[in-house]
Amino acid sequence: MKASHLLYAGILATASVFTLSVSTAYAAAPMVKTAAPGYYRTMLGDFEVTAISDGTVQLPVDKLLTNTTPAKVNKALGKLHQHSPLDTSVNTYLINTGSKLILIDTGAGALFGPTLGKMQANLKAAGYQPEQVDEIYITHMHPDHVGGLMNGDKMVFPNAVVRADQHDVDFWLSQANLDKAPQESKGYFQGAMASLNPYVKAGQFKSFDGATELVPGIKTIPAHGHTAGHSIYKIESKGQTLVLWGDLMHVAAMQFENPSVTIQFDSDSKAAAVERKKGYADAAQQSYLVGAAHLAFPGLGYVRKEGKGYAWAPLNYAPQP
């Protein structure tokens, strides 16, 4: 038999084996229906930054956004193949400075429904334990930012000092404010108290007032409006900057192009809009990295000026060595 015939016979034999293997691979397999653990890691100079997902929650944003109309909201969502209710990320950020491990916000814990409360599991998946966290900086005391501090009556972060702006302390931890709040708002106060008071009683809470350097490389920037003490955090290392916005904005599809659009969750919507415009303008001008609690996970990226508004450029995915 010629060599060419032998080669052809070999190809046919291989093909028959391949055909057999393919045909036997059609057996039905159960769908897994789970995603990878929700964390993403990047470097900022000498600092390690880990975005940690607390999960997502569906929000009827066409009804929640204000200073606009439901029709405009739905049109903006449709451009990005989104719809209301919108799956909205809840992001937290872990900063390892090399000497301290600092968590920015803690997610919702058990305060906001079954689709959230995944921060602790994802923190562990990212290679850290709650006991290792040295300090926790709270952007504001809404339940989806402070609920992860507690697991029932147990402090999740037994060795951490928790810090937040005094204006939020005075508002959300006030029994008098709870007593006079409308019934539909009382849960916000109760959630803040249940989450923060155990740390206060343990001597592990320390407030700040306005712009403050908390540790070398991390400063607070007051951005009051969404709440009385809403704060954003500026992280700097080796000439690189990351600003964590907290709830400076909520819905990318609408609020980048139209920063005047507000949301019902704002305590002072006019002040919140002013702070948002200021934050956008600074981020676009300075070209630093931004992280936000409710941008699609991991919520990291850059802002650029576009027309009368702004546009969002997500951080390009890059694996860490």
Image (cartoon, rainbow, N blue to C red):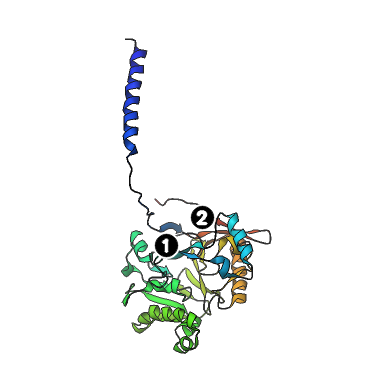
Label drawn at residue 295: none
Is residue 267 something one can see in this rendering?
yes
Amino acid type at image mark 1: Ser
Judged from this view, the residue extending furthest toward the front is 28
Label drawn at residue 53: 1
Q: Residue 231: x, y in percent? A: 51, 74
117 or 28, which lies in front? Answer: 28
Q: Earlier in the sequence, mark 1 or mark 2?
A: 1
Where, by quadrant of the figure, is residue 156 drawn? bottom left
6 or 321, which lies in front? Answer: 6
Answer with left or right where residue 54 lies relative to residue 67: left
Helix, strand or loop under label 2: loop
Q: Is residue 100 above or below residue 168?
A: above
Amino acid type at image mark 2: Leu
Judged from this view, the residue extending furthest toward the top is 1
Q: Is residue 245 above or below residue 200?
A: above
